[in-house]
RNA sequence: GCCCCCGUAGCUCAGUUGGAUAGAGCAUCGGAUUUCUAAUCCGGUUGUCCCAGGUUCGAGUCCUGGCGGGGGUGCCA
């Protein structure tokens, strides 16, 4: 089973092939002129230049080849050679009856050849998560859902930033505050206290200050870098201290991710790869791939035919410390050995695109990842406040993610009270609804934008709950649930989907047939906004249907049964699509 | 300096391999409710798609140059 578009593309692809053209010219798209037709094929125009033939004549031959088919009610040639296509109402209904029986709503599985590793999350130890981490987690989880749904085993990995210079900064800062602690005694080998010397709150307070100082004071920075090298070399006191840093941070991070409804299969941070980095660098040196340059060890990645200069990937600083490129490379090696994936996707800020270009090239050059494995940096844009600059609180601080989420949930709850929604329900259900609505608002606001573009995060604006928003989609689905509940009370059940008899019905049915195509495009182009657009369009079509077709009041039992089946399918598809986007539908709102 | 991305309605943004009359949401104006929950729906208004060339039967989309904004650029991540 497939989308209407795919079915039609098959038919027209075959017709183009039969006429002696490439199959791909038979691509059918959703009509841009719904007043004229439902679908169109523009292949005759595309092929006419190469074939040096009149596009209208080509179109005529194709239409003739397709001939009369049960799927189609109408074909015509328009303008310079567009083929306009309408589906037969009976086929529309028959197809949707199949879709309604399919738990996957018509989307085929197994389209991606192997396992997919998705790298997202990636927060840093001791740095609280803020609004910037929202995109990362939301987009990453959406991909994880999408590929999982398309039938690929997915490994989601939270690549924790727990091993860089910021660790040295923290160690130095704490050494200055509490030099009496045993961790700083160079000769000490432990044991160390069982209790962490700092709380997460203290750690989060220490880090920004330490970072500021190191940036301003070269000597402080030098000390931090020295501590980093010593940590990486296994100095016992530092390792013990570092472990506490990681432990208290991870506890906080887990709480934040849980609040956000995001989970990972693995939490393999950079530190996990220390031994592998050592081995890898030694090997690359031995193979002659890694070279010394200006005191550091680098892996050149430029290629013949490059139109621009790609700097080499740095593997080791002149002071002996590894860099994040080193750990990324070692991580790739580990992932190939451990998971043997067909695809590895990095959901990381788009500003790191040069870095990933370097890492990917290095991985190919060093034979770590074969060309057959797709490496993709799915970069995303930044989140800005209403002033176009990074999102801040009124006090000017970056707002912490946990606080932001609490604020969103609280506002959603208020809005429910204002609207008088679910006020007769128990308190925990109301909280649950507020959480689902708040999360949906956040997720949809993020995902409906194209991944690579920056967007403005205006909390007041999207908490309006109007227009193209997550709550709108949820509400549409809740309306359906409500009708189905009432129908069940009246002992009415869905019947057989029949051919449409009104525009509202037909448009709803067409939208219901488009789901597989939008899921596929979203996955292929790593663009969740495509799925968002589809879901919004379906919700709009349903709300129009809701206005025009009063299901419970309908006298004709067969028609009522068909309508119930139709909205049941609409709910199933919305549940599926919103689920892929990470949105849960409450029973009422 | 060099490289990358972006510039579309008053605002925030979509725009499928180049296709017909460039679309949404917000805002604004007007209308619909004895409701299947109005967190809804319907209608009106809004454009030198940054500018100038070029390729093409056809350009928001591709190429060149310019202007404006953002980002990156071997010892942070």
Image (cartoon, coloured by chain):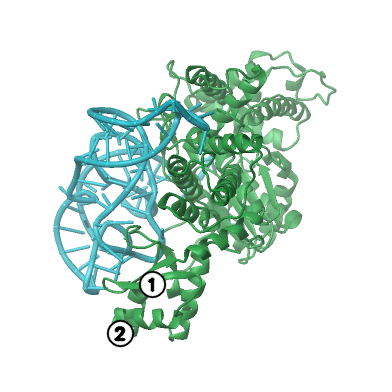
Chain colours: A green, B cyan
Q: Is residue A442 visible?
A: no
Count of labels in the image: 2
Q: Are marks 2 and 1 on the same chain?
A: yes
Q: Pick out the residue farthest to the right.
A: A191
Which quadrant does the C terminus of chain A fall into?
Answer: top right
Mark number, residue A75: 1
**Structural distance between the alpha carbons of marks 2 and 1:** 21 Å
Residue drawn at 43 percent across, 31 percent down: A457
Position of A356 compared to A199: left or right?
left
Residue drawn at 66 percent across, 64 percent down: A113
Viewer-proximal residue among A144 and A454 = A144
Viewer-proximal residue among A452 and A565 = A565
> In this rendering, is residue A39 above or below A441?
below
> In this rendering, is residue A469 above or below B63?
above
Viewer-proximal residue among A439 and A298 = A439
Mark 1 is surrounded, within 10 Å at the Cα level, by few (under 14), some (14 to 19) or many (20 or more) other residues, namely some
Residue A345 locus on image (x, y percent): 59, 52
Please name which of the two marks, 2 or 1, marks the residue nearer to the observer.
1
Task: Read off the residue under disc 2.
Answer: A53
Label 2 is found on which chain of the structure?
A: A
Helix, strand or loop at label 1? It is strand
Q: Quadrant of residue B56?
A: bottom left
**Marked residue nearer the N-terminal end (2 or 1):** 2
Label 1 is found on which chain of the structure?
A: A
Residue A51 locus on image (x, y percent): 34, 84
Residue B61 locus on image (x, y percent): 32, 59
Mark number, residue A137: none
Position of A100 compared to A536: left or right?
right
Q: Quadrant of residue A390?
A: top left
Residue drawn at 37 percent across, 28 percent down: A386
Helix, strand or loop at label 2? It is loop
């Amino acid at each position: 089973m497939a989308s209407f578009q795919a079915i039609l593309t098959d038919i027209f692809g075959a017709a183009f092939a039969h006429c002696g053209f490439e199959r791909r010219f038979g691509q059918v798209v959703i009509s841009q002129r719904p007043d004229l037709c439902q679908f169109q094929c523009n292949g005759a125009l595309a092929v006419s230049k190469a074939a040096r033939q009149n596009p209208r004549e080509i179109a005529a031959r194709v239409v003739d080849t397709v001939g009369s088919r049960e799927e189609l009610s109408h074909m015509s040639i328009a303008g310079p050679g567009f083929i306009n296509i309408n589906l037969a109402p009976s086929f529309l209904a028959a197809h949707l009856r199949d879709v309604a029986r399919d738990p996957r709503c018509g989307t085929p599985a197994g389209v991606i050849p192997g396992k997919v590793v998705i790298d997202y999350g990636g927060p840093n130890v001791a740095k609280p998560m803020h609004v910037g981490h929202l995109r990362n987690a939301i987009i990453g989880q959406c991909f994880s859902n999408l590929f999982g749904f398309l039938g690929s085993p997915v490994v989601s990995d939270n690549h924790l930033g727990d091993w860089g210079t910021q660790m040295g900064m923290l160690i130095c800062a704490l050494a200055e505050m509490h030099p009496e602690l045993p961790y700083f005694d160079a000769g000490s080998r432990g044991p160390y206290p069982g209790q962490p010397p700092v709380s997460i709150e203290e750690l989060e307070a220490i880090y920004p200050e330490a970072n500021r100082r190191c940036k301003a004071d070269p000597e402080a920075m030098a000390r931090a870098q020295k501590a980093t090298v010593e940590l990486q070399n296994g100095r016992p006191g530092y390792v013990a201290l570092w472990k506490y840093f990681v432990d208290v941070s991870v506890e906080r991070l887990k709480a934040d991710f849980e609040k956000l409804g995001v989970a990972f299969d693995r939490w393999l941070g950079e530190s996990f790869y220390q031994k592998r980095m050592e081995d890898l660098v030694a090997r690359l040196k031995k193979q002659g791939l890694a070279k010394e340059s200006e005191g550091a060890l680098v892996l050149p990645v430029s290629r013949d035919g490059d139109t621009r200069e790609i700097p080499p990937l740095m593997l080791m600083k002149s002071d002996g410390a590894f860099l994040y490129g080193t750990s990324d490379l070692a991580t790739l090696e580990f992932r190939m050995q451990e998971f043997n994936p067909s695809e590895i996707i990095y959901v990381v800020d788009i500003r790191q695109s040069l870095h990933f270009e370097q890492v990917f090239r290095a991985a190919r050059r060093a034979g770590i990842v074969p060309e057959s494995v797709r490496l993709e940096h799915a970069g995303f844009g930044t989140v800005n406040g209403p002033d176009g600059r990074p999102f801040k609180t009124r006090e000017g601080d970056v707002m912490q993610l946990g606080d932001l989420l609490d604020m969103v949930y609280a506002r959603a709850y208020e809005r429910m009270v204002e609207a008088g929604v679910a006020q007769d329900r128990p308190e925990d259900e109301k909280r649950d609804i507020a959480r689902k609505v708040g999360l949906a608002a956040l997720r949809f606001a993020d995902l409906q934008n194209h991944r690579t573009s920056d967007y403005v995060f205006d909390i007041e604006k999207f908490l309006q709950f109007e227009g193209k928003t997550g709550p709108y989609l949820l509400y549409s689905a809740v309306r359906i649930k409500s009708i189905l509940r009432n129908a069940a009370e009246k002992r009415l059940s869905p019947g057989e989907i029949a051919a449409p008899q009104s525009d509202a019905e037909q448009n709803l049915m067409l939208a219901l047939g488009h789901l597989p195509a939008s899921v596929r495009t979203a996955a292929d182009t790593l663009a969740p906004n495509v799925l968002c657009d589809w879901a919004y369009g379906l919700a709009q079509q349903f709300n129009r249907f809701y206005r025009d077709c009063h299901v419970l009041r309908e006298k004709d039992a067969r028609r009522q049964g068909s309508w119930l089946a139709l909205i049941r399918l609409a709910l199933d598809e919305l549940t599926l699509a919103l689920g892929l986007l990470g949105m849960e539908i409450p029973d009422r709102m």
